[in-house]
Amino acid sequence: MKKTLYIFSNGQLRRKDNTIFFMNEAGEQKYIPVEDTSELMVFGEVDINKRFLEFCAQKEIIIHYFNNYGYYSGTFYPREHYNSGYMILRQAAAYLDGTARLGLARQFVAGAALNIRQVLKYYQNRDKDVAENLAGIEDLREKIPAMQEIPALMAVEGNIREQYYKAFDAIHGQKDFVFEGRSKRPPKNEMNTLISFGNAIVYSTVLSEIYKTHLDPRIGYLHSTNFRRFSLNLDIAEIFKPILVDRVIFTLIGKKMISKKDFKKESGGLLLKENGRRVFVEEMENRLKTTITHRDIGSPVSYRRLIRLELYKLEKHLIGEAAYEPFVSQW
């Protein structure tokens, strides 16, 4: 299976014969076989040239860029090789049909809410005091089918996440990672920094999986299709963030794999240092590779593969083969 390569150091990326060649500022060199690489996630200041980009396009390697805070900045998206004119028309038709768009948007929010519930139930079964939060989320979840407009639906989703975030301190129990409410751009404390960093990775991972389907990432349903470059990956990521990002964060904190010393203050916010980023992505990759027995397929499936299967389900929905239902974790 091809791998994701994370680059945290500053340096240069070049083509060297039939490999990717990286040299950091200290002059240390690394050769990366293209056959083993599906995507690059670049967090450092990395210099590239046209020849390297042409090589990546030829080998269908996606490059995701992140800024100093670990926020997603942009993607080098090779020429879409699976894009289907028919599928793009079906995607657009579903977006332009208000009822069809709302139906899909509700499913994405419902999927996110159900996976949030599963995360809380997992920790409730481990004697964490989250019963009140679970009850609040159940009440909010019942409102989803009644929402008749996207902004109202997104408001319900926001309220669900607010209730969910209130349970974080009870789950991890570490005073160094007190939540204090969601803050972004820049994140104001350690927990917010971890959430933002993890979310950026999942958004990019979903985008890479969309590239391997007939879907167009520019046409989303919960998140409006506008002048933003991509939106479908944001929709699908909502379903997987609780079971990927949040579970990884609780593991990192619970096992003391990340501590306060892995953060630094900068520009009015808090950054995750390079070592902390490395620890985070290693645990995230472990999570993405973890397999579960898929109840429909009956065989082991990795979490990364589950993302692709979710996209295939959306394709089938759009062409009228089967109504879309979001993946809900049983673990």
Image (cartoon, helix red, strand yellow):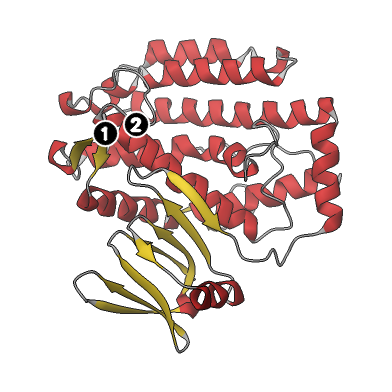
| Residue 222 seen anywhere in this rendered image of the structure | yes
Quarter location, residue 232: top right
Q: Position of residue 149 (x, y in %)?
A: 73, 17
**Distance between the alpha carbons at the discs numbered 2 and 1:** 8 Å
Q: Is residue 12 above or below residue 217?
A: below
**Pointer 2: what residue?**
186
- Numbered tag placed on residue 320 in the rendering: none
Residue located at (38% from left, 14% from top): 131
Q: Which residue is mark 1?
A: 267
Q: Does residue 293 appear in this view?
A: no
Place of residue 44 in the rendered image (x, y in percent of width and height, measured from the top left): 32, 57
Q: Residue furthest left?
A: 261
Q: Residue at x 69, y 36 (%)?
A: 226
Q: Is 109 above or below relative to 57?
A: above
Neighbours of disc 1 within 10 Å: few (<14), some (14-19), many (20+): few
Instruction: Give the residue type that dot 2 points to.
Output: Pro
- Among the two numbered marks 2 and 1 on one chain, the one whose residue lies closer to the N terminus: 2
**Between 148 and 286, the one nearer to me in the picture:** 148
Percent position (x, y) of residue 120?
Answer: 41, 25
Viewer-nearest of discs 2 and 1? 1
Residue type at numbered disc 1: Ser
SS under mark 1: loop
Q: Secondary structure at mark 2?
A: loop
Residues at circles 2 and 1 in contact by the CB criterion of under 8 Å: yes
